[in-house]
Structure formats: C-alpha cells, structure tokens
Image (cartoon, helix red, strand yellow):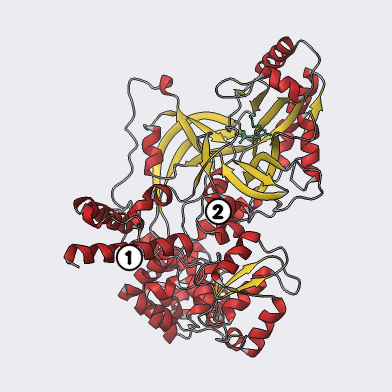
Amino acid sequence: MDNVGAILQQLRAELEQHNYNYYVLSQPTISDREYDEKMLRLQKLEAEHPEYADPFSPTQRVGSDLTSDFKQVLHQYPMLSLSNTYSEGEVRDFYERTARSLNEPFEIVAELKYDGVSISLIYEEGKLVRAITRGDGTRGDDVTANVRTIRSIPLKLQGTDYPPVFEIRGEILLPWQEYERLNKEREEQEEPLFANPRNAASGTLKQKNPVVVASRKLDAYFYYLLGEQLPADSHYDNLQMARGWGLKVPDVIKKCMSLQDVYDYINYWNNERKNLPVATDGIVLKVNSLRQQRNLGFTAKSPRWAIAYKFQAERAVTRLNSVSFQVGRTGAITPVANLEPVQLAGTVVKRASLHNADIIAGLDLHLGDSVFVEKGGEIIPKIVGVDIDSRSILLGDKVRFISSCPVCGTPLIRPEGEAAHYCPNESGCPPQIKGKIEHFITRKAMNINIGPETVEDLYEAGYIQNAADLYILTIHDLLRLERWAEKSARNFLESLRESRKVPYERVLFGLGIRYVGETVAKRLAVAFPEIDLLIKASLEELTDVDEIGGRIAQSVINYFSDEKNQELVNRLKEYGLQFSLSEDMLTNRSEKLKGLSIVISGTFTLHSRDEYKAMIEQHGGKNSGSVSGKTDYILAGDNMGPAKLEKAAKLGVKIIDEDHFLKMIADGMD
Ligand code: IVH
C-alpha cells in the first residue's frame, strides 16, 4: 500500500476509536475541535483519492451521527404549538369563537401549562418503545435512552385496557428543588448556571450519557393522548384512562362548563402555581369532545380547539446605572447590571445577572437605558429587553464586555466552546487568590471557622497568599491585627490544627480545581488513593475513572502541571494535611473487580443501585452506563430493560444477580 493508503487507514481507525470513546463510552479523549479537524482531513483526502473510497469509512456516517448526537425521527402526528393569549378578553374571544363555530353545547378542559421540554412517547403493546423531542415539530430527536431513566415514566403500562399503539405527549420538567440543587453544585464548581428549570431540563435531556440524566431527577407530566384506537371520545376521559395505565396525568385538570369556570381556574392558579413543585407559565384550555375537536380542526400552526393563556411574568422597568464585572475564584468573569432599585414580585431588585458577553451583545445595552426586568421562572432577575422608545438623543455608552481583568489587568481569555471569559492570572489576581482561600476553608472542605472578611484582612495585611500560608500564622501575627482577641485567635488556630484531620477527598475538593466538586473529588480520591498518583495521572488514566470525562481530566492535568500548585500541595503535605485515602476507606477496598467494566440494570432488593455502584468502585471495578463489547458483567436486578438483555445476549456478556455479585466481592472470584 502506498503512503496515502496508509494515512487513510490510520485516520479512519483513529476516528473510529474516537467515535467509540464519545458515543459509546461518553468519554471523549480529544476535543470536538480536534475531532472535527481530523474528520475534515479525512474528508479532504478521500475527495482527492476516490480510488480509496470505503463505505465503512467514518466519513460515511457523518450525516447520521455527527451532525447531531441523537437520531432524528419523523413524528407520526406533527407536534404543533398553541396560540398564546395574555388577557381575559382574549380568553373570552376564544370561548365565543368556539361557541359560534360549534353552535352546540361544549365543555372546556382547563389544565396547567407546564414550562419544560415537550416530549412524545410511543407505547406499543404497553411498552415504551420511543421518546422523541419536539424538534422542528415535524421531526425530533430520539431521546429514548435518556427518557428511560426518568422514574415517573412507566416503561411498561399497568392494566390491559390500553390501545395496542398510541402516542402520549407531555412535558419533561426538572422540579424546582432539583434545579436549585443542580445550580448550587454548578456554582460551587464555577460552571455556568442554568437560567431556569426549562433550560436545565433541556440540557439534561440532551446529555450523551444516560447515567448523568439518571442522576438529575427529571419528572414528566402528560396532557395529550393520540392514536387511532383511543378508549374514550373525550379528551378528559382519555387522560383519566392514561392515568390508570400508570402515566403521570396531573390531577388538577378541570372540566369547565362556563366562561366563569374558566376565569375561576385562571385566577386560582395564577397565585397557587407558586406552590407547585414544578414551573408553569400558563393555563391551557381545550375543547373536551374529540368529535368537536375534529370539527374545529387546525390552522397551519396550532389547533383551533385549544389555546394557551400565559401568566403575566412579573416585570418592572428601571434604569441601568452601570455594569460591573466580578471575578470568581477560578477567574470566571460575571457581568452584573446595577439597577435603579425597583419593586418586583415582593422584593426590591438592585442587580441583575447579565450572564456573559453574548447576552450583553444580544441586548444592545447602553448605560442609562430603561430596561425591562423580569422574575419569571428564574430566581435571579434578568434583563429581558430595552425600552428603545424611551431612549433620549443622548444615548449612554454602549455596554461592552471587558477585554482585561477589572482587578489585575491581565487580558482575558475565552476558551473554545465556552460562553464565559476568564482571567488567566490564577496565582496573581487578588479575587482569585482570596476566592481560592475562601473555598479552601468552607465547611464542606477544610471547615476552618473564619469568614471572608477575615480572609480579606489577612490577605491585605500580607499574611496569606495561598491556603498553605494559613498554617504558618502565629498568635502574634493575629494579635497584631485589629479585630482579633486572644480567644478568637486561639479558636482559629485550633480549627486549623483540627483541619489536619480532614480526609483526603475533602482536601482535594478544597484545592478548588476547576470542575472538581465534592463528588468528583471523592471519585478521584478513591481512584487515586495517594495525591502523587493523581499528580502523575495521564489523561487516559483519569478518563478511565467512572464519570470523569475529558473536560475534568484536562482540568486536573492543567492544575498539577502548574508548579505553583505542586508547591502548594507539597507545603500543605508538610504541614500535616491528609493526602492519602483514610484507613477507613482503604480497609474496605480491594482490587477484586480490577479492570472489570460492570453495567447495573434493573431494581434490587438487598442494596440500592447507588450502593452497588459504590461497591463496584470500592473494589476497583468500573461502572458503565451502557452495554458494549467492553462490558464484562451486567449486574441485573428485576425489570432489566429488554434492550439491554438483547444486547447482552448478542455480545455474550455475562449476567449476574445480586447474590452472585456480593459473593464475588466477598471471595474475589466469580
Ligand atoms: S397541549 C396540539 N397541554 O405548550 C396542542 N401543551 O405551545 C398540544 N404545554 O408544545 C399541546 N403544558 O410543550 C398542551 N397542558 C398542556 C401543556 C402544553 C405545556 C406545552 C407543550 C406545547 C406548548 C404549546
């Protein structure tokens, strides 16, 4: 084979491997950009040398796999939207229009309008066979694997009175509580926050790894049944039947006999919705009888038999006074709008997040503008627009994102594919230095009892430049500063001494490596029970750890490749901090499952899934989300998915039950 042939072969093999890492293992080892570059090179070479064409070349499936991560599927019934109304007058118009068109008595079903991601489920013979997103209304993404992880969606229906084939539509939602938990976690790791639960739900549903989806407790509510053989001839009764099959149909739907009933429903929920566990943004009104629905029909975009009434988002107009840029512990820059204080939804709003440079540019903000501030589904109020008409001729300065750090002046960087800008001067930029120390001392990390003001004082006085400096502070140093009395100084030194017992995984978390939150720190500590092992770990060794992807791995490598960080660790070690896994964690550990990749499937009786996951890791095994040629065992409980079963049989993967597994880790053999 000549040179070109060899290069082509090499490139194809490499790309296949990366495909596998990305799509099957969800653990890419190169960036999307590098991948795309390789793919382009291959495409170009193939175009220049058609004599080497190969139908199995990775270029031949660019269309299906690479333009989007999910398979696109045609909807049997297009997924239309609803026309929106915003006032009782428009609701009356709808009601009267319907009355005129039908010219006979009718019922309206009132429901809540859930603010999530719409989904269409197909059940065949009582089994969930497909879940498709709305997409462009005609075709959507097949997200079945992810949807199967949502506990409230039955994989198999209850009873027997369901049609052989039907579709049910609903909304996938991330409950408020889970949304707040997720954002808190992201905040700790200085990852960009989700603006609202809908974005969070949509981002979660598009995750490539169903294990991640499963860990974020999505929920789903259903509101529309479609099919050729529906059990009842009214929308309301069909939904009641669907509830009987185990589908989550909200019980707050109501049959309304008059316009007044509809208004009452709207008024009640306008307030009461604030007590619901999930986000809603309106009411949906639907003609109940399916026969009447057919008579009314559809416009090109939406049904004539239904409308949405949108709740008023709580909104205020105020003046944009200035924009400040805050520097976080990892150097991430957050733009904040400083507003003329204004009353909004029960609180006074003075500031609003502007998220990132793209959002600022999109709003075309100028200082002094009258801006609309909304507190819709969001916790943090946001600027949704500018009242252009009220701009005076003397337009204020255009708000631009800064190009250098507002504190230390270092030119900012914006990493490929990220929305955020960063100040790269990690060890010289004061808010980053202080932020890192503040993070180090938090309760979840070293639990040292001083507050941010004290860190500020100690830093300003020149006593601390990094976390290690805390450990050489003396009582004399402290007493020389204002605010310190002998007692508080002694307490502080005592809590520093105590912190030497804090376990390794929390110390690791305390270092504040970007993307290494509490859970990741734990995983890393178990996989690399000595810090030196972690410092030396390669990208591959890191991504081999369950749920450590390329981004986290690269961040760990970057952190330890900085000499200053290594020096910090060495000093902390010298001062007696824990940098290896505790005896406790170690004694229960073994290598009995070393090198084995195990998939957990189904429900268990002796331990929970999470406990089994932990056991697999504790004994050196690797948890994997999907069955592949690399899977060694499937730990199967009840109701294991048929797809997995089939795949396992095809690949000849061994299936073991709970008892067998527990015996394996007890004996160390299978
Ligand atoms: S019925 C043909 N009912 O709102 C109409 N939709 O703009 C089918 N939605 O795409 C939709 N709650 O994502 C319906 N109770 C409800 C709903 C609801 C939320 C969403 C859905 C739809 C959009 C309509």
Which quadrant of the view contains residue 41?
Answer: bottom left
Which quadrant of the view contains residue 395?
Answer: top left
Towards the viewer: 250 or 558 = 250
According to the picture, the residue beneath numbered tag 2 turns out to be 183
Look at label 2 and name its amino acid: Asn
In this rendering, the count of numbered labels is 2
Question: Cα distance, mark 1 to mark 2?
Answer: 37 Å
Left or right of residue 640: residue 551: left
Sort mark 1 into few (<14), some (14-19) or many (20+) by Cα contacts within 10 Å: some
Q: Is residue 390 above or below residue 76?
A: above
Left or right of residue 170: residue 450: left
Q: Name the image quarter holding the C terminus.
A: bottom right
Q: Position of residue 63 (x, y in %)?
A: 39, 47
According to the picture, the residue beneath numbered tag 1 turns out to be 14
Q: Position of residue 566 (x, y in %)?
A: 35, 78
Look at label 1 and name its amino acid: Glu
Left or right of residue 606: residue 438: left
Which residue is at a point 57% across and 61% down the rendered structure image?
Answer: 211
Q: Is residue 326 above or below residue 509?
A: above
Sort mark 2 into few (<14), some (14-19) or many (20+) by Cα contacts within 10 Å: many
Which residue is at a point 79% across and 28% down the rendered structure image?
Answer: 233
Towards the viewer: 469 or 86 = 86
Which residue is at a point 38% across and 67% down the rendered structure image?
Answer: 554
Q: Is residue 625 above or below residue 366?
A: below
> Taking the image as drawn, is residue 52 in sight?
yes
Residue located farthest toward the front when viewing the structure as drawn = 51
Q: Position of residue 18 (x, y in %)?
A: 38, 63
Q: Nearer the viewer, mark 1 or mark 2?
A: 1
